[in-house]
Amino acid sequence: MNIKKYLTLVAATSFSLSALAWEPSGKVECIAPADPGGGWDFTCRSVGNVMEELDIVPGNVQTLNMAGAGGGVAFAHTVSKRAGEEQVLVAASTATTTRLAQGQFPGMNAEMVNWIGALGADYGVIAVAQNSPYQDLPALMEALKEDPRSVKFAGGSAKGGWDHLKVLIAARAADVESLPRIPYLSYNNGGEAMTQVVGGHVDAFTGDITEVQGFLESGDLRVLAVLSEERLPGQYADIPTAREQGIDALGPNWRGFYMPADIPAETRDYWINSLDRIYTSEEWQAVMTQNGLMPFHMSAAEFENFVQEQIQSIADLSREIGLIR
């Protein structure tokens, strides 16, 4: 075969393989496991918009809000009603893995869906009022070592939820004993919890970095530590990590997606590659900057392994404080 015929054959083969590659057609749905306005709703709508801008989908991405059971209704719906559906994405976060770890989705587990990727994170923080006697995280942890009931924490999640667990992750990393005795007060949201701290009714706040921005700017709160691998960029660069203070505690509230089971490998690969492309795009980086999301990206097997490890870690901690058996 001469070179011209060979190149023609290669080109034809490449074209035919490209033509056979799976791409979405028609309606693409993104299920947000909560009412409009929350973090999962934001994930669906903002990622959907970027998908449209990058021509990853042929039309609009329809956000379907499906609130209930802290994400359990959407998870059960995906498992029981959507298996094999190739154009359904479901927003997820650390709240999803927390509830899976604590058995709050009865009869279901993480292996019943496909974990596609994460596109950013809101990192946990521990903060105190500006006039608090605690000047750094080790000082606060020393107080807990002397008396686990001496520091009261406030957060926007229920007892055993992600805000509560961030305190326990830091305390366990600091070798604090009697973790179940550490007082945690649950409020309707992070803003209400911070108001209690600023007002002197509670000693410390546990939440996410984006929640404290306004209170930081006003000077009402001091963040003792951010639970990230390295210092965060931009306006948060002066906040020390727990790690650099000798306490190896991490608390990323990641934002990402899972899909139904029983989808073809080429479909799964398409969505994995699409999320990789979204993460590196200028459009998504602008969304992250505007909404306070920090760098955090995993996909495919790495993300699936991370999810399983996070579930195991949260289950161990929840068992240690008596939330599960």
Image (tube, grey):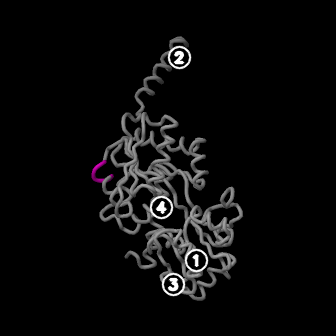
Q: What residue type is labelled 1?
A: Val
Farthest-out residue, left: 81
Residue 124 location in percent, x, y? 57, 66
Q: Name the residue under label 3.
A: 178
Range covered by the magenta-colored residues = 78-82
Mark 3 or mark 2: whose residue is earlier in sequence: 2
Mark 3 or mark 1: whose residue is earlier in sequence: 3
Between marks 1 and 2, how big is the CA–CA gap?
70 Å
Q: Are marks 3 and 1 in contact (CB under 8 Å)?
A: no
Between marks 3 and 1, how big is the CA–CA gap?
23 Å
SS under mark 2: helix
Q: Main secondary structure of the magenta part?
A: helix
Determine if the magenta segment contains residue 166: no
Q: What residue type is labelled 2?
A: Leu
Instruction: For marks 3 and 2, give the one nearer the viewer.
Output: 3
Q: Name the residue under label 4.
A: 94
Residue 2 location in percent, x, y? 53, 11
Q: Are marks 4 and 3 in contact (CB under 8 Å)?
A: no
